[in-house]
Amino acid sequence: MEVKKTGISRDLIIHPGETIADLLEERGITQSELAARTDVSPAYVSNVIAGKKDISVNFAFALEYAFGVPKSFWLNLQANYDAELLNANEAQTITEEEKTARESLKDVVKYLRKTGKIPVGEKKAASIISLRKVLQISNIANLKNIVPVGAFRMAAKPAVDPYVLGAWIRLCQLAGENRGIDTSFNEKKIDELTDEIKEIMCSRDANIQRELQEIMAEYGIIFSIVRNFRGAPVQGYISRKNDGAYQMVLTIRGSYADIFWFSLFHELGHIFNGDIGKTARFIDDGCNRAQEAAADLFAQNKLISQAAYMEFLSSGDFSIGSITAFARTQKVMPYIVIGRLQKEKRLDYRCFSEYKLRYKWSE
């Protein structure tokens, strides 16, 4: 018995010719008589019964007359056989490059197994088939071709693995599927949106991902947080839908809450500033310095009023009491102010570390 590596026995796959043979025996009809009834050669009938030839459209049409069985039955029988045969031969379609890609995707496979999206304990060949199905790609080596041209063009990005980045992009795309929204993004409502995001940030009992998804959807943004992987050092993913809505995906690479919220406002800046084309995917790899500077400025000003911040700096009082009081006037958490002061080197990074919240990925 020949058994496929992924567990499907080819002996269990029945060629449509066997059904014809059963009907001939049941009705006492010879192969030659069937050939005459269907206007084909006896050799053709013999080859179909032996599984050497497929049932053609014309033969299925003729069999309807010969047996009184609808042609759709015969065509479906052949189609099911073809599909089962493809499944049985699936492992043989794995290329050497797919095996190479699979080595790069160890962390992705581990995550997909942990979340129940692919089976645990599969051998590598079977896991490649599972990756194809989960990521909806016929050859996982082609994941590298999903990465937009020009992404990570700077030589300072040696840690990028195109297979991992392609898989991450597919996970982002899949996270946004079947989540249609009725509202287009309206840049005139950006202040309303940022105010509501700040409310979630400051809410003690907020379910951050769920509440951000709900609020963003009201303003024309499909929002997700997707697991990050080594080999895909990205800040975010944004794409524009045909209906004027956007999809935005963030990671929690930075871990610290102030980095997460700044990144969220930074990605909003890219949308507000018009950095995302109508059809292009936007991978925020930090390479376009002008766009990055503009998105950073947007995030800074929406999180903290620049005029108020300058006044706060002029006081020279960076005690935790002063920081907390100032954060309250800006409707942000104190760690936002602490993070900015640390980034600008007005505070040591170890200062007030007990007030810095960290996020951890939860499956």
Image (spheres, rainbow, N blue to C red):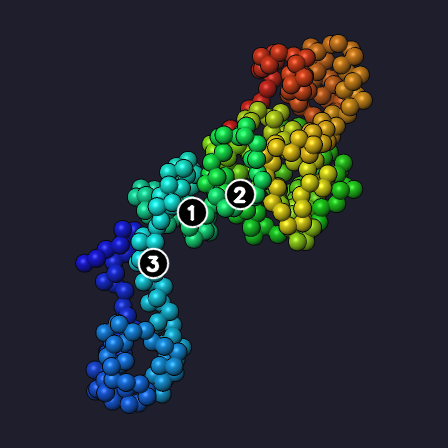
- The amino acid sitting under disc 1 is Ile
For mark 2, give the secondary structure.
loop
In the image, 324 versus 282, the foreground residue is: 282
Lower sequence index among marks 2 and 3: 3
**Residue at the spot of label 3:** 87
Q: Residue at x 77, y 16 (%)?
A: 312
Q: Residue at x 69, y 50 (%)?
A: 244
**Residue at the spot of label 1:** 140
Q: Which residue is drawn at 52% across and 46% down?
A: 146
Check disc 2: other Cα within 10 Å, few if <14, some if 14-19, many if 20+. many
The N terminus sits in image quarter: bottom left
- The amino acid sitting under disc 3 is Asn
User: Residue 199 vs residue 74: left or right?
Assistant: right
Check disc 3: other Cα within 10 Å, few if <14, some if 14-19, many if 20+. some
Q: Which residue is drawn at 33% across and 48% down?
A: 126
Coordinates of residue 13 in the picture (x, y in percent) = 27, 64
Coordinates of residue 360 in the picture (x, y in percent) = 51, 28
In the image, 102 versus 68, the foreground residue is: 102
